[in-house]
Image (cartoon, coloured by chain):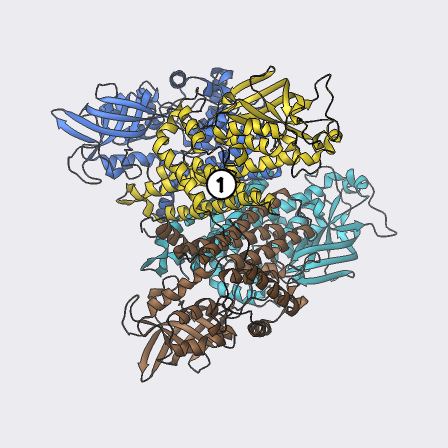
Chain colours: A blue, B brown, C yellow, D cyan
Amino acid sequence: MDLTFSAKEEEFRADLRGWLADNIPAEWSRPGFWAGVPEDEGFEMRRDWEQRKFDAGFAGIDWPTEYGGRGGTPGMKAIYDEETASARAPSTVNALGLAFLAPTIMAIGTDEQKREIIRPLLRSEVIWCQGFSEPDAGSDLASLRTAGVADGPEIVVNGQKVWTTNASHGDRIFTLVRTEPGSQRHRGLSMLLIDMHQEGVEVRPLRQMSGATEFGEVFFTNARVPATECLGGLGNGWATAMLLLSFERGASGILQYTSFRRSYDEIVRAARALGRDRDPVLRQELGRRMVELECLRYHAMDVLTKVEQGVDLGSESSMTKLQWSETYQDLFETFDDLLGSDVAIDAPLADLDVTALQAEGFWSRSVTIWGGSSQVQRNIVAERVLGLPR
Amino acid sequence: MDLTFSAKEEEFRADLRGWLADNIPAEWSRPGFWAGVPEDEGFEMRRDWEQRKFDAGFAGIDWPTEYGGRGGTPGMKAIYDEETASARAPSTVNALGLAFLAPTIMAIGTDEQKREIIRPLLRSEVIWCQGFSEPDAGSDLASLRTAGVADGPEIVVNGQKVWTTNASHGDRIFTLVRTEPGSQRHRGLSMLLIDMHQEGVEVRPLRQMSGATEFGEVFFTNARVPATECLGGLGNGWATAMLLLSFERGASGILQYTSFRRSYDEIVRAARALGRDRDPVLRQELGRRMVELECLRYHAMDVLTKVEQGVDLGSESSMTKLQWSETYQDLFETFDDLLGSDVAIDAPLADLDVTALQAEGFWSRSVTIWGGSSQVQRNIVAERVLGLPR
Amino acid sequence: MFFALTDEQRALGDTVRDFLADRFGLTAVRAVFEDAAGDGHPPELWKAVGEQGWLAVCVPESFDGLGLGILDAQVVARALGAGVAPGPWLPTVLAAEAVRLAGSDAQRAELLPRLASGELVATVALRGAGRGYDADGVAVTASVPAGESAPSAGTGAEAGVEAGAEVGLLTGTASPVEYLTVAGLVVVAATEPGRVAATSASAGAGAGSDGGSDVGLYLVDPGAPGVTVTRLTSYDGTTRLATLALDGVRARRLPGSSTAVLDDLLRRGAVLTAADLAGIAREALTRTVRYDQERIQFGRAVGSFQALKHQLADLHVAVTMAEHAVMYAAYAIDAELPDLLLAVAVAKAKASQAARDATSTMIQFHGGIGYT
Amino acid sequence: MFFALTDEQRALGDTVRDFLADRFGLTAVRAVFEDAAGDGHPPELWKAVGEQGWLAVCVPESFDGLGLGILDAQVVARALGAGVAPGPWLPTVLAAEAVRLAGSDAQRAELLPRLASGELVATVALRGAGRGYDADGVAVTASVPAGESAPSAGTGAEAGVEAGAEVGLLTGTASPVEYLTVAGLVVVAATEPGRVAATSASAGAGAGSDGGSDVGLYLVDPGAPGVTVTRLTSYDGTTRLATLALDGVRARRLPGSSTAVLDDLLRRGAVLTAADLAGIAREALTRTVRYDQERIQFGRAVGSFQALKHQLADLHVAVTMAEHAVMYAAYAIDAELPDLLLAVAVAKAKASQAARDATSTMIQFHGGIGYT
């Protein structure tokens, strides 16, 4: 057991912490700040932040330097996750591109794709959307219907995607399309990289419970994409999608822990401000949440150790997802209990701005659904980890 | 809405209450009394109690008078359940015979069976066991293996039954046997009424977690039963069993409510005696249990109303079972929380005899398993009540 | 033993449900929800609510009401909850209950017919922000206007005396108050320091009073001088909330009011809220079951996955128990059963939990196995 | 970053597990369980435990121990928990920890080698029945024997002084005490009224002491005059409990003892208990998974029913988290991490809940879908 980072890693932490302190405006740390910024303006501020971070050498911490990354260790990536969350740096505007598309291109992209896609993605010059879910194909990706038909050197795409994150801000979309007409299930699919700034692509925002429009629907009506803009080969989309989704396991949990712990501390502050901090039943609930949060931290160390040792995490990442998503959702149920009937009021309460936490509460409902629902994760743990029969 | 009973029913209540007050020795009501009586002796005391009750006209409240019953209304039966539980009358020694076998015989038994079986059963002169579960056939009754082969006017039975309640005290056993060699699943079964006092029947008690031996295994080795001692016809055992199990829906929940409420009150008394009654977290837990208990009472009124109206409860009885069994088990989890690390000590604590409650705590583990496990009940509710697909 | 709704009561519930399905479905609800700046009070819906008599359920027949009880009112509340119908039905009904329970004959005659018909929209303001639902949660104080003496002991006992002459000056802030911006009348609870001794002799005016009278109920005109109404934005777009700040506002007192009447009123509100929640829970469950019967994933109906089935089965048990509990509590109030305090608490606790579980399950099972 | 057991630690766990599987399987455990009248201390098992060095893990090498930490001890505890092995391993280890942490050099030299080898069975008696696990839960009081003076201030500071000469007269009742009937030595916690002032100057003797010394740890011979041992019957047949009543029993004091040392000792006990529970939880889960993979009902393996699979999956996550938490807490004690108080609480809470959930699920899923 040795829970320290190497001297080189701690040096990186000091550099990063100093840079963050110098570059994050104080107002960003004010609870509720981002909730008060109009959605589009906030997006541009965050995109600009990504570019400054890139230019300062703090993007792609564990990516190879040839792609603009820093070439760091998994420990440095964990430190980066921890420090940026602690410093309340805004979350990335290019999450799905960074988490999924980039590593897939590094693994199986053509040289041209590697050269042209990864660096602008990392610098958030190009915002990438993911086009997987369809109205009739959610967890069951293989039943998707969006169709692509070859037309000379191009493919013409028609269909609809839903629950597309950042749809309104996207520049390009990596999307799973049925390119062999009449093909069934996993066969005949291709991963196409489609330009969203063209006439055949229409985006409609989806309004969430919280009023935010982070998700959208994307409609393709004779949208065109060069056949070369296909990742992993035409007709090979299923394998490409599976490889792509496998990178989710990179999430170690430390980012979630650090940011959830911050929410937790704010909830405790709210409890104090409302005079509920002496309520034994609420304290008990908060205690239970703390137990799960700390377990998430220990678990993140376990995962980081395995990553450093080069162990293939495989289906274990389903456990990470279950632990963080269920813990997060439970935390905001406790927050609801704290506010009681005043939880519904979208306004400062007793001089306390809890609107950011309230928005998080709505958001917490989605985390057990996207990225593989809790039901899907439990199937994976039961079948692939415990070996129970299908 | 009218939650009162009729004048005739209330008159019955007064009679019964008076008789119970005169006939139940004070010591029986002392918490822990029955736990202190050796198992066999306790059984005989309870059997004797059943006979006195019969002789006083307080057995078979809603059974026809021709079978020795009182010919009363469902309301009188509910009053009986409530009053006997309130008065801490001992539970019956012939539960499975009363609940299952007798109504089945009334429905489809031969005249001889009606004449010879029901009255001695009601007076507990003959104790009946139920022989359904086998080592390889629990919830899945259709896969049972105990075999019966015709030998002249008799059937020769070989096989094993498990989890047989009151096995050590049983006189006869109604048991599901495969009487057509080589038959599959639901076919070729018969419900045989076998004398347990014969050479080919051996009973081995099963020791439970709590040390009690209420259950047992029954081994048949060339046990013999006249072919006439078959209920519902040879080869027709599956239909007979289904009819028999359908009578479980008779349970209205009022008996469970009254007796669980008594346990609840004793747990609250224990909390007071231990000075834990001011603990807000424990109070919250006790409050939750009270909510579920009271809901069980309201539900019992709902069921009684339906029975009085002649409505077929059908699969709704699965809901009753879920509500009472899960509530009961949760109640004893709260009891464990109350005692803390002292729950394991089988001895008076701080001048408080909680051993009866501790024994109930172990017993509460079984109620979500027998009589159709919670999993089976949830399947029934989902499929037959909500109409979800199989 | 008859633990069930009568045919008339069931018919009442069906009428509300059918009306909403035909004339104010989810699309209409959504329009109200989306119109965050609006008052959340669609006039065509309110007109129908008044015409149908749903506001008149608990109003005595002598005041143009139906003369029924909370058991009947909960039938309406449950159906309105199932349809997530917006509008000030519940606050108006509670205000009318306050007038019925504690008003003078003249006040009843003046207000109840107008409340029963929907002509007068009303609401109740019984507590301060973040405070409890009882006398301790009251955040408004009443004082006797300068130059007027408090009613002397015995006033309430003199038959025929116009108790409406009693007035108080109210100061303090109640929040959140439902539908305050559309209400023509607010029943405000206020503590009455120094009044206890003066009124204890006339406690008989408040039916069921426990002898104290440290809280009075007052009739406030939201347009009166000294009243400040501040809208609150709410996440729940099917209701509208506001803050009621009072600065020396002159208001008539309900002469029968007392802490006991406040508690009674709060219990009625709790049971009707529980009914609303039970209605929401049942509807959420029913919609989820229907969706999951039809939604196909991995080549089979999502509703055939056992993990989901078992959770829905548990939910069905919980929602059914909540329905039983609401019915029992409503009847316990009507019949003044000895366990009514417990019954109301059980109903509120069980229905709240059932609604929370049912709606979160609805979200998860519409997206859960369904959506990635 | 290395959040994992070393190869040596893993091998230690395997050794314990393999030994129990070969030499003290569930049949042997059951025999102890059934023999309610026995002392629950099978000699052949204890002999092996001593020979294997499992009692010596935390004892310094200079006293014939292995000189390892709680992280290593929890490996043993977890494996013993998984095998539900009976016997006084934990109480003996805790007694040895008390001597190591607070004993004089002479006491250490006298007792630690005997405790490490298993020659001397020991236990700890730190609280009264139903009381808390802290200084307030101590139910025994120590007084200075008549005619002997309390050690003067500064005694502990004089190097080379034989602190073992300190004695107290103990009165009070500690309960429940594990394996008291087979122990040759009991470490008893006792409050020391009036001693605070006298010893505060010598607080340096108790490492990590917070300056107070209102609780002392004493070495009691269960055979000494004034000791009454009363057996308690327990539902858990894998341990044995008794009450220790002391009436003016003369006992040697551990000179370094203090409230801080008591707290430290209780934390070590909590982490090792949590490890035991995590071992039980993992074993219960593993056995249930194995049973449900094989048990056929309705023509398919019970383990293929999704409702059951999902519950087992959640349990796997919970048990894994409990294992992480126990490891972290044990290391936090060894490395004196700043968050060690939180870490111990998290480990105990998580492992307790996981064990409770895993064992109740084991009962349900061995019978649940399996048996009617």
Q: Give C243 or D353, whichever is nearer the viewer.
A: C243
The three-letter amino acid code for the residue at tag 1 is Asp
Residue at the farthest left position: A152
Q: In which quarter of the view is residue C357 placed?
A: top left
Q: In which quarter of the view is residue C31 placed?
A: top left
Residue at the farthest front position: C160
Q: Looking at the picture, how far across and down is residue C71, in whole percent?
A: 51, 42
Question: Could you say whether the residue bearing mark 1 is in a helix, strand or loop?
Answer: helix
Q: Looking at the picture, how far across and down is residue C35, in whole percent?
A: 41, 22
- Label 1: how many residues lie within 10 Å, few (<14), some (14-19) or many (20+)? many
Q: Give D349 or C66, whichever is nearer the viewer.
A: C66
In-image side of A94 versus D283 (left or right): left
Q: Looking at the picture, how far across and down is residue B317, in whole percent?
A: 43, 56
Q: How many marks?
A: 1
Q: Is residue D211 above or below residue B89?
A: above
Q: What residue is shown with label 1? A: C72
Q: Residue at x 25, y 39 (%)?
A: A142
Q: Give B92 or A332, whichever is nearer the viewer.
A: B92
Q: Is residue D304 visible?
A: yes
